[in-house]
Structure formats: structure tokens, C-alpha cells
């Protein structure tokens, strides 16, 4: 048994003044809420962008009302030019991946709940934590400012492949100032995430309360800790890559642009650069990034499931080991994004093998969930529904990954809608379901009020069915040869696929409308929701031992002592079927981690 | 009775003798800051590893790489930085002696801290001189990929040195107050970071000497 002696306790007075309390707050809870709010704004911007894209794809000549105000040259009269479609697509991906999927499940929930769940009063570096949010906020504003420069945002995709992204204005609208703003935004974002990861790692390793051994930490804490370790190394590589890209634009260097390029009938003066270098640097970050997006959601789903299963998982320990294995392997697989890039074909084997191997820990995690669900009486509420939905989306999206992992198949499927379907299901929708599960689960702790269950279930079912209606047909489209990142499908072999696109667009608009239900529920419940008890879900982890909302120092000056792991469910304890982590009550249970 | 941890273990070793200042009190020393600085060093290392790999790839990607001789001031700068690490170590010992009341007066420990700070600024000035020397020979940022990487690596390193100088300034400021508020963990963290910046420079010098 590993006992941690009590960590340093910094007793500080409650913050006073509006600015210190709500703006430049040092409180990890406020910072978590700020991150969540930023992600909320970002997700609706990304959603609207996706609507505009989908409407254009299904009805190419349609004048979308209002878009002409976004860009007179990009969407004259509301009809998107081909370039502007690509520009919106680039920003959709950038905003969603960076400012929603990296921000909400990791920085949002993690900042709020990690210190509480390990029994700490706050993170060890509150000033750095505050800086990390405001740096991320600046990055977000810089990214959005790309919409308002004369040529608009870049059109090279969220992956910003060179040489298109490195050539400058000549490569197309938005490739000048827009691309530089994009690169600056992402470089700033990397700094913010590194500061955040620093806090998460230090909190997990050094701020645990007495009795909180590593194996007694909730799965959410493990997930955030593993994510921050991945983020530390991944973002530290993306930042110099963005610096090199900025230098190619403003300093006249040629890191990514080879010689002999003729663009718009003009021979480019760049020489010697390597376009493949950008891809290697980007995807070395890019693949761990998708695990940064999904691992926190895996933790949240595990946590929500356990609480609603009312019994421990088959093996939380193996689940932790699997998450660690995924993190470790995530660095070895990045080349599967580059099978058709022109790199040595033998490298494809070297990347394909670990890509297939990484499915093993992922499958183990899913089997632990499914095995734990088997024979259980899961409490059905919106949070547990979204947790189940996550499993469904993760499996559906993951299965298509098997096909893409094999170079022989990827040759046909690369850059088709098959890939788009795969990553939207396995990463975007699944992580979003994790965010929703966490929101419905922890809303009562953060605000002291419950979210409306009826509206929550309406939100869930429309989103669940809608997401499948949108993204399942993408696989069919991909296998039929539908190329991705095209603004219109004029080739004769894609013509017959238009009805599918129309169906998808209608599904997307309906599913998007359901997110308004969520927003309404969120805001209405915040002010007028039913008052919540301290522990409405009868959870065992430390966040349920404190009032809702928690006091500024989390535990009211009394740091808890932990006696159990957070899976003591299904026990017979004083009329209850669970034992809180900080309860000294010793009950007979199948297993209790030390 | 629990024995008091030694200096190297994060404790004061002896009961503090400076009235009102216990730099090693549990409430003030933080194992988290040591974890934090190691995490920061890991991230910074990854950044420079990424640039190193970019440099190796870029050098092999094309035949346009032109070598040049490193400005001599870079070697002088190396000695300056190594010396600053030595003075910082002396400063740490002196501060500890003062904290224990073994050494009377703060002027000697403060002097060693100021010396470290001065050597750090001298290093940054030396980097600027190196850039001027290179410029005088016609090697600018975009002249050749070799010069691009030279300026990028040295500028990025200098930026991190400036961060270290900010940390040293904080240490000096806290140490120089009427009643010092300097914590052992702050001094240790800043020292670790400064030595790291030194080791990083040795690596960069070898890399640039070998490949540029």
C-alpha cells in the first residue's frame, strides 16, 4: 500500500473582485468553466460552418442567406466559390479539432475535476493555469481573425499540407495572411496546451491527498494524466513546425517548398525544401492529437458507466494499462496518414503493423465496458445514454480504421469520404458524446442544479440517430470513390451519389438543430433547473463528497483522506450500495485497490 | 523524532537562523515545482529534437546546403554559460549557508546570484554579436537553409535563456527583500532550469559545429 503524505497545502483567501473571481481567476474550477465556455462557442461556430458546407455540397448553386456578409468575394450573393468552400472546410476542421476536441474534454473537465478527484485544493501552478486559458483564448481569437482579413482564412485544410500552405498568396485566396494567422494561432495554442499539461502532470503526481495511491485514482484522472503526457510531447513538436511554416511565409526561407514549382504560370523561387518534412512533423503531432481528443472521453465514459452500473468494471487496472499502451503506441503509427505520400513503401509496413496493434488495447477497453455491462442493471439517464452512445460510435468508427490501417486498401480509400466517415465517427462524434456524458453527469456538481432529463433524452436520441445518418453513408460514398475536400461532385461517377449527399445534409441540419436543444437545456437549467443534492448519482469519488457548487478551496479547508478505490459499488454498506472513497467504513467487497 | 530532511532532500538540514525566514518550511517547499520543471524540460527537449530532425531531413532533401564556420564568439559564449552554471552552484551553497545562519550577511550570496545573472545577460549579448558577425559575412536568415537553422536554433535557445534570466531575477528579488521570501523550491527549480539551458546549449553547439 502506498501512502502519500499530505501534500503542501496553500491556504489562500477567497478571491475578491469581479476581475479576479471571473476573468483572471486562479481557481482551477473557474478556469475549467472558461475552457468549457470557449469550447461551447467554438463548437457552434464549427457547427454553422459544417451546415454551410453541407448545404453547398448538396445544392451547389444555392444562395445560402447570410454567407455573403462573411465574405463578399468568397460567397457573392450567398453562393460559395470553390475556394471559399475549402476555406470554410479548413476552419471547420481547425476550430473543431483544436478548440473543441482538445479543449473541452481535457482542459475543460480536467481543469475542473482533476484537483478535486485527487483531493487537492488547487493545481500547483495557478498562475500558469490562468495563463494557459488566456493564451488559448488569444489563439482562438487569432484563428477567427483569419475570417476578417481581405482574402479570408486559409484553404489548405486543418492539416495545412505543404507546398500549398507554404507558398504564400500565390497559392490561392487566404494562403497569404490567412495561412500566417492560422500558423500563429496554432503555435500560440501549443504554448497554452503545454502550460496546461504541466499543471495536470504536477497535480497528478504531487498533489494527491493521503491514501490516494495511483491505482486509487478515478479513471478520469488517469485519462487526463495520460492525455497531458501525450500532449506534452505532441504539441512540443507542432509548435516548431508552425514556426518553420511561418518562416517560409514571412522570412523567405524554404523549409517545405521544393524547387521547380510552377504556380499560376510563375516559377517559384523557393528551392530545396521538403514537402514530406511538413507531413512528418505534422502527423507526429497529429496522430497523438487524436488520442488527446479521445482518451479523456474514454475516462469520462468509464467514470459515468461505473457510477451507473452500480458495480465495478471487469478490471479498471487493465483499462488503465490499455490507455497507457494506446498512448505509447500512438507515436509509432503516425505514418498511416502518409501511406500514399510518396514515402518509402516499406515504411508503410512499419506504420501499418503498430496501427493494427493499437486496436488491441482499444478493443480491450471496449470489451471491459461491454463485459461490465453484461448482466448489469445500468441506470438509464442522459449521461449513461451518452456513455453507451460513445461505445457505439467508437466501435463503429474504429472498425473502419481496420481497413484504413492496411496500405493496400488505403491506396483506394485515402482522400475519400471513407476516411472522413471514419474520423468523424471514432473521434469527433465519440468525443462529443463523451463531452455530453460529462456535461450531463457533472452539471449538478458545477452549478448545484440538474439538467432537464426529458430534453436530455430528446437531445441524445436525435443526435445518436442523426450522427449515424450523417456519417455511416460516408463509408459508402468513400467506397464508391467520392473524393474528399471537393466542393462539388461534377465527375460522372459521382453524379449518382448526389441523393446520398442530400440525405446527409438534411440529417446534418436536423442533428444540428438538436444541439440547440442542448444549449437551451444548458442555459435554462443553469438558472432554473431543479436543485441538486450533493451526490445525486450516488457516486464514490471525491467530487461527490463536497457541496455543489464546490467552495473556492474545494474541501473547505479539510483535505480528505482516502480509504478505498472509486469502484466500491454493489457492496452492502449501511443501507447503501456504495462506499465513498473518503469513508473510513470498511466493507466486504470483491476487490479494493490499495 | 522525525529527522529533518537534508538540503538535497528539500529540507534545511538545520533549524533556520534568519529571523522570519524559513525557506525550507513544508508550507513553502513544493515537490510539485520540481516535477513541473522536469516536465518543462521534457517539452523543451522535444521542441529542439523536432527542429533537429527537421534540420537533418532538410539537409538531405536537397543539394543546396552550404556550410559555414561558426562565429568564434559562440565558443566564448559557451564558456560564459558554463561559468554561470558554476557561479549559480556557488550561489546556492551560499544562500543555504546564510539561511542556516552559518554565513552572516547576504551580500556574498547575493553577489554570486548577481554574477550569474550578469553572465546570463553576457551570453545573450554574445549571441547577438554572433548574429552580427554572421550578418557581416553575408549569412542572413534566408540566405541558405544552414543559416536559417542556425538563426532559428540560437534564437529559440536565447529565448529560453531569457526565461531563465527572468527566473533568476525573481530569485534575486525575493532574496533581497528586507525579510527574504525566497523558497528553497524556487531556487532549486530555477537552478535546474538554468543548468538545463546550459546542457541544451552544449548539445546545440555540437550539433551546429557538426552539421552547419
Image: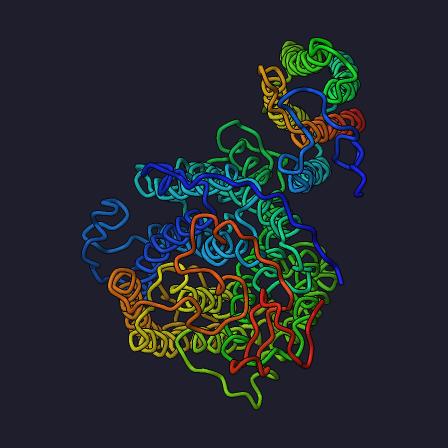
Q: Is residue B78 left or right of residue A280?
A: right
Q: Is residue A85 left or right of residue B72?
A: left
Could you say where residue A271 lies in the image, as x and y percent from the top left?
Answer: 60, 34
Query: Residue B199 sits in which quadrant?
Result: top right
Question: Camera-side residue: A363 or A151?
Answer: A363
Question: Camera-side residue: B57 or A429?
Answer: A429
Residue sitting farthest toward the front: B1
Could you say where residue B178 lies in the image, as x and y percent from the top left?
Answer: 58, 14
Task: For residue B69, say whether it is visible.
Answer: no
Question: What residue is shown at x 33% (from left), y 74% (from top)?
Answer: A456
Query: Residue B180 sits in which quadrant?
Result: top right
Q: Is residue B106 left or right of residue A231?
A: right
Give the colour scheme shown. rainbow
Query: Residue A465 sits in which quadrant?
Result: bottom left
Residue A187, relative to residue A563: is it above or below? above
In the rendered view of the protein, which quadrant contains the C terminus of chain A?
bottom right
Residue A525, relative to residue B145: is it above or below? below
Total number of numbered discs in the rendering: 0
Could you say where residue A462 lies in the image, as x and y percent from the top left?
Answer: 33, 77
Question: What residue is shown at x 57% (from left), y 35% (from top)?
Answer: A244
Could you say where residue A510 lies in the image, as x and y percent from the top left?
Answer: 28, 72
Question: Camera-side residue: A477 or A239?
Answer: A239
In the rendered view of the protein, which quadrant contains the N terminus of chain A?
bottom right
Task: For residue A297, say whether it is visible.
Answer: yes
Question: What residue is shown at x 48% (from left), y 70% (from top)?
Answer: A425
Amino acid at each position: 500500500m502506498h501512502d502519500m503524505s499530505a501534500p503542501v497545502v496553500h491556504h489562500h483567501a477567497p478571491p475578491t473582485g469581479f476581475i479576479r473571481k471571473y476573468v483572471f481567476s486562479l481557481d482551477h474550477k473557474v478556469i475549467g468553466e472558461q475552457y468549457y465556455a470557449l469550447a461551447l462557442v467554438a463548437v457552434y461556430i464549427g457547427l454553422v460552418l459544417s451546415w454551410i458546407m453541407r448545404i453547398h455540397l448538396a445544392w451547389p448553386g444555392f444562395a445560402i442567406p447570410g454567407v455573403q456578409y462573411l465574405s463578399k468575394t468568397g460567397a457573392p450573393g450567398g453562393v460559395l466559390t470553390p475556394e471559399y468552400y475549402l476555406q470554410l472546410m479548413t476552419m471547420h476542421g481547425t476550430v473543431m479539432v483544436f478548440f473543441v476536441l482538445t479543449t473541452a474534454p481535457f482542459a475543460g473537465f480536467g481543469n475542473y475535476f482533476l484537483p478535486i478527484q485527487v483531493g487537492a485544493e488547487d493545481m500547483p501552478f495557478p498562475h500558469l493555469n490562468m495563463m494557459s486559458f488566456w493564451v488559448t483564448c488569444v489563439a482562438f481569437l487569432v484563428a477567427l481573425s483569419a475570417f476578417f482579413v481581405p482574402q479570408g482564412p486559409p484553404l489548405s485544410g486543418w492539416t495545412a499540407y505543404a507546398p500549398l500552405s507554404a507558398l504564400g498568396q500565390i497559392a490561392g485566396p487566404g494562403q497569404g495572411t490567412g495561412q500566417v494567422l492560422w500558423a500563429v494561432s496554432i503555435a500560440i495554442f501549443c504554448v497554452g496546451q503545454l502550460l496546461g499539461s504541466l499543471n495536470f502532470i504536477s497535480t497528478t503526481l504531487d498533489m494527491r491527498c493521503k491514501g490516494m495511491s495511483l491505482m486509487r485514482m478515478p479513471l478520469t484522472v488517469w485519462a487526463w494524466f495520460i492525455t497531458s503526457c501525450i500532449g506534452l510531447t505532441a504539441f512540443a513538436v507542432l509548435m516548431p513546425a508552425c514556426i518553420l511554416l511561418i518562416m517560409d511565409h514571412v522570412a523567405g526561407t524554404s523549409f517545405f517548398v521544393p524547387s521547380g514549382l510552377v504556380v499560376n504560370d510563375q516559377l517559384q523561387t523557393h528551392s530545396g525544401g521538403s514537402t514530406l518534412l511538413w507531413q512528418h512533423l505534422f502527423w507526429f503531432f497529429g496522430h497523438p492529437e487524436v488520442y488527446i481528443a479521445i482518451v479523456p472521453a474514454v475516462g469520462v465514459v468509464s467514470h459515468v458507466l461505473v457510477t451507473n452500473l452500480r458495480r465495478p468494471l471487469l478490471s479498471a487496472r487493465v483499462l488503465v494499462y490499455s490507455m497507457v499502451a494506446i498512448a505509447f503506441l500512438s507515436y509509432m503509427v503516425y505514418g498511416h496518414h502518409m501511406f500514399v505520400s510518396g514515402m518509402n513503401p516499406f515504411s508503410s509496413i512499419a506504420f501499418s503493423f503498430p496501427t493494427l496493434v493499437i486496436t488491441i488495447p482499444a478493443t480491450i477497453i471496449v470489451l471491459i465496458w461491454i463485459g461490465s455491462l453484461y448482466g448489469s442493471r445500468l441506470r438509464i439517464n442522459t449521461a449513461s445514454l451518452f456513455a453507451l452512445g460513445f461505445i457505439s460510435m467508437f466501435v463503429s468508427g474504429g472498425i473502419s480504421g481496420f481497413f484504413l490501417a492496411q496500405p493496400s486498401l488505403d491506396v483506394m480509400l485515402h482522400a475519400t469520404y471513407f476516411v472522413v466517415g471514419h474520423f468523424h465517427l471514432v473521434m469527433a462524434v465519440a468525443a462529443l458524446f463523451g463531452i455530453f456524458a460529462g456535461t450531463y453527469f457533472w452539471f449538478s456538481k458545477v452549478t448545484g442544479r440538474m439538467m432537464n432529463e426529458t430534453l436530455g433524452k430528446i437531445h441524445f436520441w436525435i443526435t445518436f440517430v442523426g450522427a449515424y445518418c450523417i456519417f455511416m453513408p460516408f463509408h459508402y460514398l468513400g467506397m464508391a470513390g467520392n473524393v474528399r475536400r471537393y466542393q462539388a461532385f461534377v465527375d460522372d461517377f459521382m453524379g449518382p451519389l448526389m441523393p446520398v449527399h442530400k440525405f446527409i445534409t438534411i440529417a446534418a441540419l436536423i442533428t444540428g438543430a438538436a444541439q440547440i436543444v442542448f444549449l437551451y437545456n444548458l442555459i435554462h437549467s443553469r438558472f432554473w433547473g431543479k436543485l441538486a443534492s450533493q451526490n445525486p448519482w450516488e457516486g464514490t469519488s471525491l467530487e461527490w463528497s463536497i457541496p455543489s457548487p464546490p467552495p473556492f478551496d474545494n474541501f473547505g479547508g479539510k483535505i480528505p483522506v482516502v480509504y478505498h478505490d472509486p469502484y466500491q459499488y454493489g457492496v452492502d454498506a449501511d443501507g447503501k450500495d456504495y462506499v465513498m472513497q473518503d469513508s473510513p467504513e470498511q466493507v466486504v467487497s470483491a476487490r479494493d485497490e490499495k | 523524532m522525525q529527522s529533518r530532511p537534508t538540503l538535497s532532500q528539500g529540507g534545511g538540514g538545520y533549524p533556520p537562523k534568519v529571523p522570519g525566514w524559513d525557506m525550507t518550511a513544508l508550507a513553502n517547499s513544493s515537490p510539485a515545482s520540481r516535477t513541473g520543471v522536469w516536465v518543462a524540460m521534457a517539452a523543451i527537449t522535444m521542441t529542439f529534437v523536432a527542429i533537429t530532425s527537421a534540420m537533418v531531413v532538410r539537409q538531405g532533401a536537397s543539394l543546396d546546403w552550404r556550410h559555414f564556420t561558426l562565429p568564434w564568439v559562440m565558443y566564448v559564449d559557451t564558456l560564459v554559460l558554463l561559468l554561470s552554471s558554476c557561479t549559480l552552484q556557488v550561489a546556492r551553497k551560499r544562500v543555504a549557508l546564510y539561511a542556516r545562519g552559518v554565513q552572516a550577511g547576504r551580500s556574498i550570496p547575493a553577489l554570486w546570484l548577481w554574477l550569474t545573472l550578469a553572465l546570463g545577460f553576457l551570453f545573450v549579448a554574445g549571441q547577438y554579436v554572433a548574429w552580427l558577425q554572421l550578418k557581416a559575412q553575408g549569412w542572413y536568415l534566408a540566405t541558405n537553409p544552414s543559416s536559417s537553422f542556425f538563426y532559428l536554433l540560437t534564437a529559440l535557445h536565447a529565448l529560453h535563456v531569457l526565461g531563465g534570466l527572468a527566473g533568476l531575477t525573481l530569485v534575486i528579488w525575493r532574496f533581497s527583500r528586507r525579510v527574504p521570501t525566497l523558497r528553497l523550491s524556487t531556487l532549486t527549480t530555477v537552478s535546474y532550469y538554468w543548468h538545463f539551458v546550459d546542457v541544451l546549449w552544449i548539445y546545440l553547439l555540437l550539433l551546429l559545429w557538426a552539421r552547419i
